[in-house]
Amino acid sequence: MTDFSGFDLSLVDVVRLLAVLAAGYGAGLVHFATLETVARRIAGGRLSAVALQIGRLAALGLFLFLLVKLGAIELLLGSAGIMLARSRVLARVRAEP
């Protein structure tokens, strides 16, 4: 049997990790929800789509960079939050007529 006694998490650590997961979910929601706006602007030939796309990627890149600075577990949880948000946004888009 595996011994996990060396892995000690306090309540503060658990709350912090849940906050990272929630922050990843929020960042993912914003990132993927604005994708439709970018696509419409590109289809409409608007140059503002390029700036919005660069902003979306820069914001997500900055978020991931900050998670790297926090640690591996935080990066994994933040990325999991982003992927959960992606699934949520895709499910909502697929449900639209």
Image (cartoon, rainbow, N blue to C red):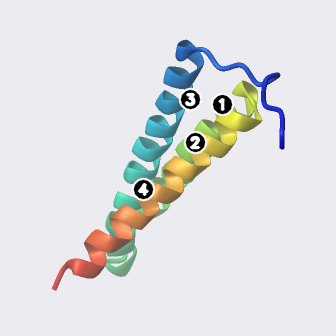
| Residue 10 quadrant | top right
Q: Which residue is mark 1?
A: 66
Q: Residue at x 36, y 63 (%)?
A: 88
Point out the frontmost of discs 2 and 3.
3
Q: Earlier in the sequence, mark 1 or mark 2?
A: 1
Q: Amino acid at mark 2?
A: Gly
Please tell me whether mark 2 sits on a helix, a strand or a loop.
helix
Q: Amino acid at mark 1?
A: Leu
Q: Which residue is mark 2?
A: 78
Closest to the observer: 25 or 64?
25
Q: Which residue is mark 4?
A: 85
Q: Earlier in the sequence, mark 4 or mark 3?
A: 3
Please tell me whether mark 4 sits on a helix, a strand or a loop.
helix
In the image: residue 59, left or right of residue 91: right
Q: Earlier in the sequence, mark 1 or mark 4?
A: 1
Please tell me whether mark 1 sits on a helix, a strand or a loop.
helix
